[in-house]
């Protein structure tokens, strides 16, 4: 129960909401990535309403709007970062962006990796 509460808060979804807003494919990929990574993946952003997306500076047409994307807290060191990116790619996330403060992962059709 605690894990579910943490996820709902991290997704910035009202407590009364029972769904994360993520597509089942995104949730399945996240579970598989956690299994491969070997530990809990801390989500900082997932499904966003259009209003929320605008308020956080999200791009129009963001994969977050369709429940196909997650943002993840940056791991503590480079070794964990490499392991996490590997786990995400093996689990079905095809869009992976590494930023200074977080990692973006989505289930787009064509694979792409970027560093910002």
Image (cartoon, rainbow, N blue to C red):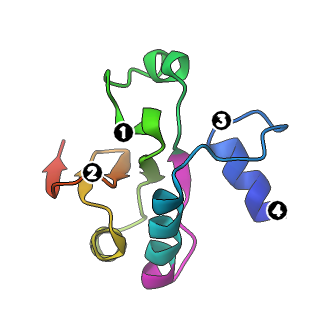
Q: Is residue 85 above or below residue 46?
A: below
Mark number, residue 12: 3
User: Which residue is depicted at the point 16% across and 58% down?
Assistant: 111
Q: Earlier in the sequence, mark 4 or mark 1?
A: 4
Which one is closest to the eye, mark 4 or mark 1? Answer: 1
Viewport quadrant of the C terminus:
top left
Which one is closest to the eye, mark 3 or mark 1? Answer: 1
User: Which residue is depicted at the point 32% across and 77% down?
Assistant: 83
* Residue 36, x across and y down, in percent: 43, 83
Q: Is residue 54 magenta?
A: no
Q: Is residue 87 above or below residue 102?
A: below
Residue bearing mark 4 = 2
Alpha-carbon neighbours of circle 2 within 10 Å: few (<14), some, or many (≥20)? some
Q: What span is in magenta? A: 35-44
Q: CA distance from mark 3 to mark 4?
A: 16 Å
Q: Earlier in the sequence, mark 2 or mark 4?
A: 4
Q: Earlier in the sequence, mark 3 or mark 4?
A: 4
Alpha-carbon neighbours of circle 1 within 10 Å: few (<14), some, or many (≥20)? many
Tell me, yes or no, whether the two marked residues, 4 and 1, touch with CB atoms within 8 Å. no
Mark number, residue 63: 1
User: Which residue is depicted at the point 64% across and 47% down?
Assistant: 20
Q: Is residue 36 magenta?
A: yes
Tell me, yes or no, whether the two marked residues, 1 and 2, touch with CB atoms within 8 Å. yes
């Amino acid at each position: 129960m605690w894990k579910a509460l943490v996820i709902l808060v991290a997704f910035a979804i009202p407590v009364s909401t029972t769904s994360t807003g993520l597509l089942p494919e995104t949730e399945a990929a996240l579970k598989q990535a956690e299994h491969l990574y070997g530990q809990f993946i801390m989500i900082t952003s997932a499904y966003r309403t259009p209003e929320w997306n605008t308020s956080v500076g999200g791009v129009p047409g963001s994969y977050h709007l369709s429940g196909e994307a997650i943002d993840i807290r940056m791991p503590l060191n480079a070794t964990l970062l490499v392991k996490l990116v590997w786990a995400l790619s093996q689990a079905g996330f095809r869009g992976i962006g590494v930023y200074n403060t977080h990692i973006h992962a989505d289930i787009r059709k064509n694979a792409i990796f970027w560093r910002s």
